[in-house]
Amino acid sequence: MAKRAAPEVNAGSMADIAFLLLIFFLVTTTIEKDKGLLRSLPPIDDSEVEPPIIKQKNLFTVLINRRNQLLVEDEQMELKDLRQAAIEFLDNGGSTNAAGETCDYCKGKRDPSSSDHPDKAIISMKHDRETSYEQYMDVQNELVAAYNFLREREAERLYRRYYPGADNVYKAMLAEKEKNQFTPDTILNGRIENIKKLFPMKLSEAEPDDS
């Protein structure tokens, strides 16, 4: 008696279904973007050059303790007041030194006990290992916003005529640079660098505190 051949299963349709499901998941799945801080790390310096001496009045200390409390210059401060405090420090222009340190574009109080010049002003930030990530990010955002506010002000003063319809000149300059990243505009890049030099971002972070 002849053996009956087992019927073959047509798997062609299964492959089509699997392929369609793969496409469906690729189209409908949303991939979360990583959140973080955009920072450019300084190049490694192997030279044995002694760090410059920093005057205490040119140092703006910001501390976040383990209870997420904000201490600015050893005094407790609310987060909503941090940006303005940083602006006043960076924009103080307190030096009247004849050696070229005078800031002729600063509009601060020119308090001799605060920063001499934006190029010398350093913000030192320190946090505890138990500080929450949300508080850390909020403080970082306020400090960066202080720099951006001052840069925006100078961009308005120097380059408003080139961006008559823009709400924010500095932001428009950065957007234009991003749009033309593959065909760099040397004039635009020069203007942006000029603004950054007026208020250089000197934001230093100390090692987290275990205490």
Image (spheres, grey):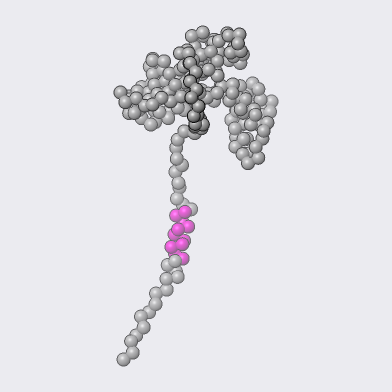
What is the residue that sits farthest to the bottom in this orientation? 1
Q: Residue at x 65, y 31 (%)?
A: 188
Asked where in the image residue 5 lies, by quadrant, the reply is: bottom left
Q: In the depicted view, which residue is nearer to us: 131 or 84?
A: 131
Place of residue 81 in the rendered image (x, y in percent of width and height, measured from the top left):
45, 19
In the figure, is residue 113 to the left or right of 165?
Answer: left
Find out whether residue 69 is within the magenta segment.
no
Whether residue 57 is visible: yes
Tell me which segment is drawn in magenta. 16-26
The percent coordinates of residue 70 (x first, y second) are: 38, 21
Can residue 25 be found in the magenta stretch?
Answer: yes
Residue at horizontal 49 percent and vertical 18 percent from the top: 52
Residue depicted at x 64% and y 21% = 157
The majority secondary structure of the magenta stretch comes to helix
Occupied quadrant, residue 107 = top right
Residue 146: horizontal and vertical position, in percent? Answer: 51, 23
The C terminus lies in which quarter of the figure? top left
The residue lying furthest to the front in this view is: 48
Residue 84 showing in the rendered view: no
Q: Tell me where residue 32 appears, x and y as whole percent.
A: 44, 43
